Amino acid sequence: MTDNHVITFYSIEQIEDHKKLGRVVERFCVKNKIVGTFFSTPQGVNTTLSGPKQSLIDLVFLLESKSRLKLKDQTWSISSSVPFKRLKIKCRDKLLPLKGNFDPVLLRGTHLEPSEWNKLILDPETVVLDVRNDYETKIGSFKNSTIPNMKNFTDFPSFVDSNLSNLKDKKIAMFCTGGIRCEIASSFMMEEGFGQVYQLDGGVLGYLKEVEQEENLWEGECFVFDERVTVNENLERGEYFQCFGCRRPLSKIDLQSKHYIKGVSCHLCYLSSSNEDKERFAQRQKQIDLAEERGHEHMGMNAKQNKQ
């Protein structure tokens, strides 16, 4: 079985024509059999893509040489199966939909290398902040982290206002999966008056890549936004599965639930999803199964561009 190379990277910088950039990336990826998701915005780009290694290397060269992007924290890994079914190019006004008068291009927290991270989070005076969603934090986190239990990242401002507003003189050490969410969250917090905001450079994925096992303070697995679902401390595919009805991670025990139907529902969403949703998901899963039986890849594109 051929290994599929996976690359994750982002860039926080002003992009004059983000829709044109999206079109350039789309053409290149289609031609070179690259799948995954690519976000293009006036604030920068964010992506996880999979395909032939040389094609991914050539895409990085294209973005850095012709588009002059400074791609941040390129994290490489290998998946034994194709982790995406299609290519999605998403052109949006913001990298992440967080309200507030802040600009991550102009103001962000201090980046810490993984080698510096342990010292900071072992300081009892440091507030270690996990800025991921609740279903991600349940899979793994750093010990003694503050967990916001957010359903969506849009809940972050209200969490900060309710729980951290009296800690503006404290050292805040935040982390997320690959680093991009911290760029936005740290910019928001600094605009709100927090003076000592630090972020894990490269996120958890960068940390697991760089830190030796005997110095690794991460506990559990790390949720990733592709069909691997989670990765372990060696950046290998983890032990979790995913409900494609609600996109949440599931353990092997969760799969035994009477409410688990492959591609349709699980114990977390069975009661909340409508019968129409279940029927639609079932038809989608049927098409996926048929395509896999025929050996076809789902290369359908989903290029969404905001017209604002």
Image (spheres, rainbow, N blue to C red):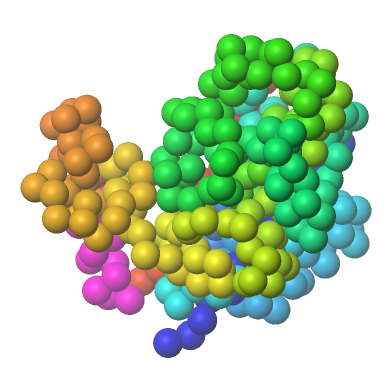
Residue 121 lies, in percent from the top left, at 71, 45
Magenta segment main secondary structure: helix
- Picture quarter containing residue 164? top right
Residue 281 is left or right of residue 97, and the answer is left
Q: Quadrant of the C terminus?
A: top right
- In the rendered image, residue 146 lying in the magenta stretch gets the answer no
Q: Residue furthest bottom?
A: 1
Q: Is residue 17 visible?
A: no
Q: Residue furthest front?
A: 124
Q: What's the magenta region?
A: 283-295
The structure residue drawn at horizontal position 29% and vertical position 67%, both measured from the top left corner, is 291
Residue 171 is left or right of residue 206, and the answer is right
Residue 87 lies, in percent from the top left, at 53, 56
Q: Residue furthest left?
A: 258
The structure residue drawn at horizontal position 56% and vertical position 72%, both measured from the top left corner, is 234
Q: Nearer the viewer, residue 8 or 183?
A: 183
Residue 28 lies, in percent from the top left, at 68, 63
Residue 64 lies, in percent from the top left, at 86, 59
The structure residue drawn at horizontal position 57% and vertical position 33%, both measured from the top left corner, is 146
Q: Is residue 295 visible?
A: yes
Q: Nearer the viewer, residue 156 or 145?
A: 145
Q: Quadrant of the N terminus?
A: bottom left
The structure residue drawn at horizontal position 51% and vertical position 81%, both measured from the top left corner, is 3
- Picture quarter containing residue 160? top right
